[in-house]
Image (cartoon, rainbow, N blue to C red):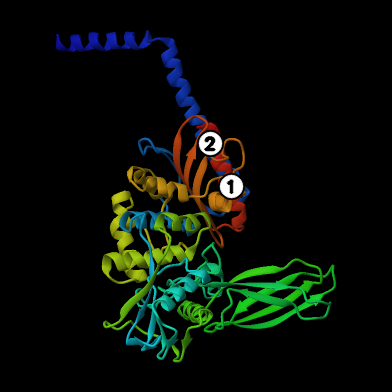
Amino acid sequence: MKRFSQFIFLQVCMVFILFLPFSMKDEQLTARTDQTEWMTALDKLIRTSPDLDGAISGISVRDTSDTSLLYEHQADIRLTPASNMKLFTSAIALDILGEKHTFPTDIWMDGSIRKKALNGNLYLRGTGDPTLLEQDFAALAKQVKKAGIHTISGHLVADDTWFDDTRHSIDLPWSDEDQYYGAQISALTASPNRDYDAGTIIVEVKPGKKAGHKATYHITPNTDIVHVVNKVKTVPDGRQKKISFKRSHGTNEITLTGTIPLNASSVRQWVALWEPTNYALDLMKRALKSEGIQVKGQVKTKQIPKKAKKIAVHSSIPLSELLVPMMKLSNNTHADILLKELGKKVKNKGSFEEGLDVLNERLPAFGINTARTVLRDGSGISPMNLVSANQLTLFLTKIQKEKWFNTYLDALPLAGASDRMIGGTLRNRLKGPATLGKVRAKTGSLTTVSTLSGYIETQGGKTLAFSILLNHLVDDEKGKEIEDQIVSFLAENL
């Protein structure tokens, strides 16, 4: 009897299913078919791209409303994220340091002031501010003068001990150390303009008055620690314009070579300096001189003594504002300064090692299994960083609930926005109707590597988190084209 009852029940269920409204069954079937079709089409796009032949691609797409995985392609393989590493560093900095965090730069004195003379030393102490400009040193000098100091009998001393003295992350290639993206990390540094490329100067080369003459050059800001060897020749119009800028290892001697036509436009290059502490110290000395303050002693570096007294202070822009040039323009120096600051804040040591420890301890709260990642710096310049696309998209979905998320989102480059501080590294990309102003994402690029991870607002009304990690490319510029094709496809089809 029991078996007969089960049989009758099954028959009734089958009849019920058969007589479901056909529209409902058709709608479900269509949805499944559509999903299969777009996945198949995306698979084909990836599989048939000649530029991915022999490369490794990890691709992950999630629905941000519930973290569900919508699409994956080799998405659990650990790959080099390049500057997508900044997605982690900036989020953990916001989480631990806070949106209002600033980096103060102080002036201290020991000794006493008598008749407008400081009988002692003047100390400049940095805590990592990457935004210090020439005008900020001038403002500090004015505060020194306001304190009643017109002469310093002792030394002008720099204190950069807030961070350790390891200037580069462990995997930085030697060939990058004079490039703006490979600038040294110091607690005391300076920037040449409001892009805040800390630790660099701008060298601008212009043609001479006549063909055959040496070219002229100008550096910004003016600093006495740089020695320029100018070997650039002015050539007749129609000849090649090609100039090389090279700083010798261990020095601030910059050699300029090449040619520039007589009526050609100028050529500018950002050059990273050796020991940015001395760069900041020199700008401070020049600012004091401009205020009529004489330093009788030498310029030195050492820690401020406990008996010293603070007489001037300058604060950086808050972290919420600093993240804009950092993320929009992909500033490596900012990211690694933040990494050291995390180490200082949590471990009381401003080093790469302690900063990475903080990342590894905090990232699991946002879905990252750090046992399955390799983190080597905060900027992504290391080719040894490894993370999977699925972990990146899970991270991007989980941080949405945080109170600082809108600040984080606003700092990401916005597709097709022409303003550099809005569109950033995406200002000339993804300008199609389905993606213009609809994609906020972090770019990444190393030799043979191109990456893009962030958020898409699709034409179907969804908000997706995506990660595209392309490694072992022959031409990493082609990687950007593939990323744009994939993102455009998602925006149009989901």
Q: Quadrant of residue 160?
A: bottom left
Q: Nearer the viewer, residue 417 or 488?
A: 417
Q: Earlier in the sequence, mark 1 or mark 2?
A: 1
Quarter of the N terminus within the rendering:
top left
Q: Residue at (61%, 42%) from the top-left corner?
A: 431
* Residue 376 in view: no
Indicate which label's residue lies in the foreground, 1 or 2. Answer: 2
Q: Quadrant of residue 161?
A: bottom left
Q: Residue at (73%, 71%) from the top-left corner?
A: 242
Q: Which residue is mark 2?
A: 491
Task: Give the Cα separation between the discs numbered 1 and 2.
Answer: 14 Å
* Mark drawn on residue 482: 1
Q: Position of residue 291 (x, y in %)?
A: 50, 79
Q: Residue furthest left?
A: 1
Q: Position of residue 139 (x, y in %)?
A: 47, 71
Is residue 11 depicted above or below 271 in this figure? above
Classify 10 Å Cα crowding around label 1: few (below 14), some (14-19), many (20 and above): many
Is residue 158 depicted above or below 428 in this figure? below
Secondary element type, mark 2: helix
